[in-house]
């Protein structure tokens, strides 16, 4: 028996990364595929104690329905934190979400109509592309390089395609690991203010800088209310809490709140209250310093291993923070074709073609360095280097045969 599905269901394409993870996260696979924080750094004991305190002193309220906007003390903590980073807001301007992913979805529902143009980098964050595709919008492709989105291209693109929203991950971008330069941040905010175009600033990795100097967020540079800023505890406390947040201009935030009411009523009450209780006593900044130290070492190990083990012609980004580096393979190689051979060597990655909204490059891959120890990173990149070298030798042999 076949059940009729809505036409819109066809727009919900499965995540290529999630499908890969079903294979790549098997115990015998040394995986660099998942965008996973290191579980050994989760403050498990402290989170457990926070839940215990909340259930003991306010169990009924912690297990009850709550407001859509979120738990007041948690919103106040987030607002104070954002204010310390130069983002002017108060608790009334914070909406708690189920991870920052929900913030992307709510913004798309409120701001976009079918056929509207969303400006994105190519490549861009896969799950955001899924959200926008489900809204039946079109993409306006903006170039990118080691300084992030080519914001100098926006004016010309807008004249041609009428951009309705700009989406980007400005800090340690997923998948490339690049960071938008200060001059480009200013250009983007000026462009958005001049044309009254909202900018969706997705910042899950901003607290994870382990090299270089901090750069002001787009929201901190915005004094006219065009930037919607998303954040999350998924990369700093634990993704299982599913606590993210949005701060946005009042009119947009009201719309997102109503959209959230239709989606899930509110984010889990117990998780919100436990997170707020944790932050009452937990040394959050000290915890961030530990994460930065560990991830910084792992990034250094991966970059060093890539230079030693990958064949000539391979290039990669050098992120100053976050969780990923982006690899471009020698000319003629396909990461998708390389994937099966890599699995045979018990190592995995995500082919980069999954992150393109159009015109995908098949010679790219995303590598995650946050979820493996330095020893396993060294071993995994050595395996990946062997696989790549064999594929390159085969490709060169085929080329030579064809020209003989």
Image (cartoon, grey):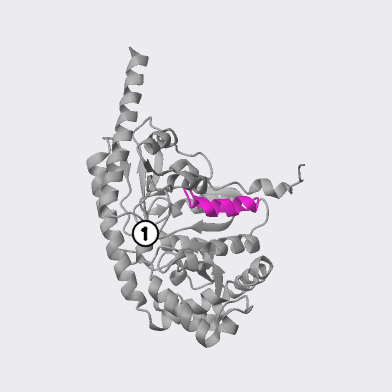
Q: Residue at x 27, y 64 (%)?
A: 293
Task: Read off the magenta span.
Answer: 116-136
**Residue extending furthest toward the bottom:** 57
Give the number of callouts.
Answer: 1
Residue indicated by mark 1: 322
Instruction: Using the image, determine if residue 365 lies above or below residue 263.
Output: above
The location of residue 307, given as percent across then percent down, is 24, 43
Instruction: Using the image, determine if residue 346 lies above or below residue 268.
Output: above
Decide if residue 347 is in sight here. yes
Q: Quadrant of the N terminus?
A: top right
Q: Residue at x 47, y 83 (%)?
A: 53
**Residue extending furthest toward the top:** 404
Q: Secondary structure at mark 1?
A: loop
Instruction: Using the image, determine if residue 215 lies above or below residue 163.
Output: below
Q: Residue at x 28, y 60 (%)?
A: 296
Q: Residue at x 63, y 52 (%)?
A: 134
Decide if residue 86 is in sight here. no
Viewer-closest of 123 and 77: 77
Residue 120 inside the magenta-drawn segment: yes
Viewer-closest of 214 and 155: 214
Quadrant of the rendered structure where residue 128 is? bottom right
Relative side of 390 to 128, left or right: left
The location of residue 384, given as percent across then percent down, is 32, 39
The location of residue 69, given as percent across then percent down, is 60, 76
Relative side of 361 to 14, left or right: left
Q: Residues within 10 Å of mark 1 (few under 14, many from 20)?
A: many
Q: Quadrant of the C terminus?
A: top left
Viewer-closest of 180 and 92: 92
């Amino acid at each position: 028996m076949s059940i009729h599905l809505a036409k819109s269901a066809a727009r919900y394409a499965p995540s290529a990364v999630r499908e890969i993870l079903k294979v790549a996260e098997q115990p015998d696979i040394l995986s660099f595929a998942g965008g996973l924080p290191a579980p050994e750094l989760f403050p498990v004991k402290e989170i457990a104690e926070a839940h215990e305190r909340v259930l003991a002193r306010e169990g009924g309220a912690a297990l009850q329905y709550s407001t859509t906007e979120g738990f007041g003390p948690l919103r106040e903590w987030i607002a104070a934190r954002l204010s310390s980073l130069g983002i002017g807001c108060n608790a009334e301007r914070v909406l708690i979400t189920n991870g920052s992913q929900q913030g992307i979805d709510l913004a798309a529902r409120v701001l976009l109509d079918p056929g509207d143009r969303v400006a994105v980098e190519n490549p861009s964050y896969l799950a955001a592309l899924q959200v926008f595709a489900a809204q039946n919008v079109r993409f306006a492709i903006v170039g990118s390089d080691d300084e992030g989105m080519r914001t100098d291209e926006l004016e010309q693109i807008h004249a041609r395609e009428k951009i309705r929203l700009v989406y980007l991950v400005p800090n340690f971008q997923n998948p490339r690991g690049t960071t938008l330069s200060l001059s480009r941040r200013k250009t983007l905010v000026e462009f958005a203010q001049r044309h009254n175009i909202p900018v969706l600033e997705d910042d899950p990795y901003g607290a994870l800088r382990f090299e270089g100097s901090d750069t002001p967020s787009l929201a901190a540079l915005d004094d006219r209310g065009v930037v919607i800023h998303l954040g999350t505890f998924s990369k700093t406390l634990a993704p299982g809490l599913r606590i993210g947040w949005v701060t946005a201009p009042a009119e947009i935030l009201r719309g997102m709140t109503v959209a959230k009411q239709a989606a899930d009523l509110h984010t889990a009450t117990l998780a919100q209250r436990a997170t707020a209780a944790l932050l009452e006593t937990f040394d959050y900044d000290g915890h961030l310093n530990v994460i930065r130290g560990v991830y910084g070492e792992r990034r250094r190990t991966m970059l060093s291993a890539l230079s030693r083990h990958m064949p000539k012609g391979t290039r990669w980004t050098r992120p100053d923070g976050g969780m990923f580096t982006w690899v471009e393979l020698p000319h003629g190689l396909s990461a998708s074709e390389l994937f099966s051979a890599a699995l045979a060597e018990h190592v995995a990655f995500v082919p980069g073609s999954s992150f393109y909204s159009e015109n995908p490059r098949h010679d790219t891959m995303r590598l995650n360095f946050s979820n493996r120890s330095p020893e396993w990173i060294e071993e995994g990149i050595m395996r990946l280097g062997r696989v790549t070298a064999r594929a390159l030798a085969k490709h060169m042999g085929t080329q030579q045969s064809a020209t003989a």
